[in-house]
Image (cartoon, rainbow, N blue to C red):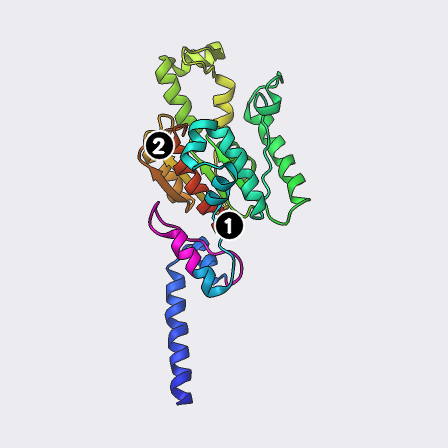
Amino acid sequence: MEDFKQRYIAARKAVIAQDLQRLNPMQRQAAMTTEGPLLLLAGAGSGKTTVGEALSRLTGREAVDLDQMIAADAGRSIPEIFSREGESGFRDREAAAAAEAGWQTVSVDLPGHGDRTAEAAELVPWRVVPELRCALAELRGRWDQTALFGHSLGAWFGLLAYPDAPLAGALFLSPVVDMEALIRKMMGWAAVTEEQLAREGTIPTDFGQDLSWEYLRYVRTHPVRRWRTPTAILYGGRDHLTDRETIETFAGRWNCRLTAEPAGEHWFHTPEQLAAVDRWQRACLADLG
């Protein structure tokens, strides 16, 4: 009997080892983790709350549903919060609920944004990237683990600033991942040739974005050559700045977990779109643990 038991254990270990070999690094880490939070990842209405409550009863651990916490605190449903208070109101409530669940959110305002709207400094990578590196150094002095949330252009700045940084993970919402392709697309919208841009230096456009030869030269001399952080991406199927092929190529190259929201746009803004962002973000944060 003892011999059979040993052979059974050895066979099970071999099967588990084979299963682990088929997983990507992020999946393998999750499979090997026996302590900490458990991620339940599934579509809306599929029973995550029910399963979470059942697991809570079986394991004796608390199941935390941030949606319920936010709704209870506000006295109204999540869709009602979006319609009455907008995204900013929901984000304030979400940050508070995340803090109650053990998360700390730190926002870094870039030139011309947030509390720095009055600054004359330009939002250009040769200014922003050094700032982001200093910010991460400060954060790492305060917390054992740091993760990154990047939206649109902010994601591209993060790619430039942190190619080798020891980040626990990254969440990219509608990320710009190929800036040269985007600039060329905008040059097409404005009917501006590369020769014109090189000659004039800066060309204003009807859509409010100046085209800059200096910016294009920087982009070409600073391509994204490395990205080692486990990354989750939420992409809107109607994104007008980044096409599907570009985002899929990037995700495949760096082994990112790509989620596509068919009705999403580059700027997620409707209550339904924001609800999709919220579900995705909560699942990713739970995954980071």
Q: Residues within 10 Å of mark 1 (few under 14, many from 20)?
A: some
Q: Earlier in the sequence, mark 2 or mark 1?
A: 2
Residue depicted at x 38% and y 13%: 192
Q: Which residue is mark 2?
A: 264
Q: Quadrant of the N terminus?
A: bottom left
Where, by quadrant of the figure, is residue 251 drawn?
A: top left
> Who's the residue at 48% across and 36% down the image?
224
Q: Main secondary structure of the magenta part?
A: loop
The quarter holding residue 15 reads: bottom left
Q: In this image, 104 relative to 228: left or right?
A: right
Q: Secondary structure at mark 1?
A: helix
Q: Does the magenta run of residues contain 251? A: no
Instruction: Specify the amino acid type for callout 2.
Output: Gly
* Residue 76 seen in the current view: yes
Q: Position of residue 190 (x, y in %)?
A: 37, 13
Residue 165 visible (yes or no): no
Q: Is residue 167 left or right of residue 210?
A: right
**Which type of secondary structure does the marked residue at label 2 adopt?**
loop
| On screen, residue 67 above or below 151 | below
Tell me where residue 177 appears, x and y as whole percent: 43, 33
Structural crowding at the residue carrying mark 2, measured as other residues with C-alpha within 10 Å and reported as few (<14), some (14–19) or many (≥20): many
Q: Is residue 117 left or right of residue 81?
A: right
* In the image, residue 44 lies in the stretch drawn in magenta: yes
Part of the protein shown in magenta: 34-54
Q: Amino acid at mark 1?
A: Leu
Label 2 and label 1: CA atoms lie apart by 24 Å
- Above or below residue 88? Residue 102 is below
The residue wearing badge 1 is 288
Residue 84 vs 8, above or below: the answer is above
